[in-house]
Image (cartoon, rainbow, N blue to C red):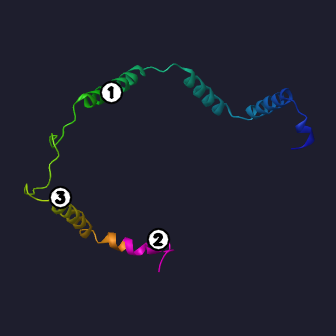
Amino acid sequence: MTPDREDMTSGQFDRMARASHARSVEHLSPAVLARLRRARSAATEPRRGRGFGWLVAGSAAALALALVATLQLQPAIDPEPALSQPQMASMPAEASAREIADEEVAAMLATLDENPDFYLWLAANDEALPPAEFSR
């Protein structure tokens, strides 16, 4: 900025801006001035017919709230009824605890056999393991 503009007060700036605007309006054609006046008067006129839009939007919002409220109040439908006691795998009554544990371990290992990507991931991440400090 030039030094004379830095010293300018807001009142001086306002007067200069109004003078510049008045000079520019003098150079406009009468057709452009008429079109600007029509646009200004159209912008200040009150608008009609907007009440119906608010009614539609309000009723849609009320309907959505009612739908959400009814869905929240409905009990959850459980596809499997809750069991009073946990059921064990079908094992004979005389099966020992070791046999039951062996069956559970076999079931867990079977899920790992179904996904060979696990083993590829495990082999790829060997360098992420900490070094063995106590190897003998």
At horizontal 90% and vertical 43% (from top left) the residue drawn is: 2
Q: Could you tell me the amino acid type at mark 1?
A: Leu
Q: Position of residue 11 (x, y in %)?
A: 84, 26
Q: Does residue 10 appear left or right of residue 55 in this picture?
A: right
Residue 59 magenta-drawn? no
Mark 2 or mark 3: whose residue is earlier in sequence:
3
**Residues rendered magenta in the picture:** 121-136
Where does the N terminus fall, quadrant-wise?
top right
Give the label on residue 49, or none: none
Q: Does residue 76 appear left or right of residue 28 in this picture?
A: left
Q: Nearer the viewer, residue 114 or 110?
A: 110
Q: Nearer the viewer, residue 131 or 28?
A: 131
**Disc 2, SS:** loop
At horizontal 74% and vertical 35% (from top left) the residue drawn is: 27
Q: Could you tell me the amino acid type at mark 2?
A: Leu
Residue under numbered circle 3: 97
**Nearest to viewer (mark 1 / mark 3):** 3
Mark 1 or mark 3: whose residue is earlier in sequence:
1
Task: Classify mark 3: residues with Cα within 10 Å, few (<14), some (14-19) or many (20+).
Answer: few
